[in-house]
Amino acid sequence: MPDPAAAAPRAALPPDRASHPDRASHPDRALHPDRALPADPVTRPVARQILEATRDLPIVSMHGHVDAGVLARDEPFGDPASLLVVPDHYLVRMLVSQGVPHDALGVPRRDGGPVETDPRAIWRTFAAHWHLFRGTPTRFWMEHVLVEVLGVTERLSAATADHAYDTIAERLAEPDFRPLALLDRFGIEIIATTDAASATLADHADLAARGWGERIVPTFRPDAVLHVDRPGWAHDVDLLAERAGIAIGSYRDYVRALEARRWAFVDAGARATDHGHVLADTTPMDETDASVVFAAALRGDVDPAAARAFSAHMLFEMARMSTQDGLVMQLHPGALRDHDPHVAASRGHDVGYDIPVVTEYVHALRPLLNAFGHHPDLRLVLFTLDEDTFSRELAPLAGVYPAVRLGAPWWFLDSPDGMRRFREAVTDTAGFANTTGFVDDTRAFLSIPARHDLSRRVDAGHLARLVVEHRLDLDEALETAVDLAYGLPRTAYARRTPRDPRAGAPAPDAVPVEVRS
């Protein structure tokens, strides 16, 4: 029977490929300079010009999940599989969806059971399934990492897996390929890690002592102690008490401990908090009611409805605390974590089973915004996984409340088309100035430049369309592109002037924050 693939006619090469035989035979030897820019011939040259204005700007990475310990230890990275495959839930979830078991990808079992441990075998499995990532942002980021960062010049496949592995392993062994050196190579001006409320911050103290304190800063993430029905909550509250030096026997003690830990983060250079609740509800509770729920949680008999109400109340409290200590409040609602409890029980968290849910903001945030939406010392950055809310809820909120800014498309939405839809949905109502630039939100350190590059390309395309439609002048588009890539994130996450009750004066080195009228 004839091979249908052999009989099928070959598609004509695009003009830029047809005129370059080397690209035609080796289509991924280099990345195309116009990738992710508009396809039409009128807009693309303008987009190129706008992109060029942002190409060499520093990266401001104010929300991510790179481990502070990796930066503090500054040791060589491990093998290609443990660096690029095993911890990346974007990769893992796609492969699992196509029947590749977690074991074959080296994802550990909680019971210590056997999984694949040969990094070359794991890499071969990934490379053999490279075709699954066609059209995904993962493909865009990983190609950038492979070609621009690691020097791989062949398209991944089962046939090229070993050569790519060896090329990467050689690069990872180079002395100038350690984490701190890459901060300079990548042009990262500042990077924020994400740290539990009970974190010792020892790695940050070590980095600060070596002169990195202004470039590598922590972010306060209290989720583990705000959800009182969460497994392990009591243990995390004990850790919170230990770190804060405050015995927690009551709700008031608990609030004091949280405030103390926030100030410890401020002292360590933190610019922001981060909250990953399922819902955006911020309905406050009476202190008496909050105390009753907290006491029940300490006894281990809190009911789910009371726990949800308490979590909402604590978001309100986090906003109140931000008006005092100056930490920017980031809210990332809308992810149902560990959708499959059996996988969570066997593999743990962050293995690809977090799923977006419908998220409501207008009513949910009304208590917080009525109390603090005009407060000069609150900056609330809102993210979503429910893109239906971009134009209906989030842009109108950011377009009127001085405290509110819109976060970048996040997680399932940080694709080229997702970011285009974001700009088209929010700009009419919120403009550009009520957004906060791009955040990479990644554990994959080597992909940070790729993610920021993609964002700059998408924004260049959006602005170019406004120019060719005579809705913006070119000089305005160039200025806006620089703001989106660099100016807005610096302003949104600027060190704020807290009212430190411990000293009765602003924190050292704090700068006043411009407040919109």
Image (cartoon, rainbow, N blue to C red):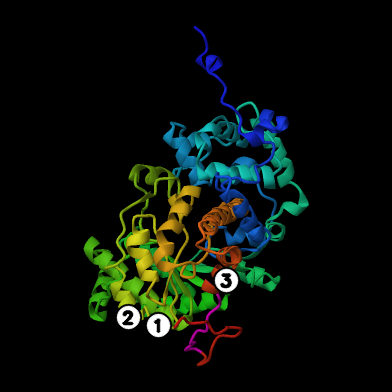
User: Which residue was labeled with disc 2?
Assistant: 371
Q: Amino acid at mark 1?
A: His
Is 348 located above or below residue 113 in the figure? below
- The residues colored magenta run 493-502
Indicate the quadrant where residue 331 lies: bottom left
The label on residue 212 is none
Indicate the quadrant where residue 249 lies: bottom left
Q: CA distance from mark 1 to mark 2?
A: 8 Å
495 part of magenta stretch: yes
Identify the element where label 3 is drawn: helix
Q: Farthest residue in the front direction? A: 470
Circles 3 and 2: CB atoms closer than 8 Å: no
User: Which residue was labeled with disc 3?
Assistant: 490
Q: What quarter of the picture does the C terminus occupy?
A: bottom left
Q: Amino acid at mark 3?
A: Arg
- Residue 320, percent from left and from top: 38, 79
- Residue 326, percent from left and from top: 48, 80
Q: Is residue 234 visible?
A: no
Is 74 located above or below residue 287 in the figure? above
Q: Nearer the viewer, residue 122 or 516?
A: 516
372 part of magenta stretch: no
Q: Farthest residue in the bottom direction? A: 504
- Residue 398, percent from left and from top: 39, 70
- Residue 211, percent from left and from top: 70, 72
User: Which residue was labeled with disc 1?
Assistant: 375
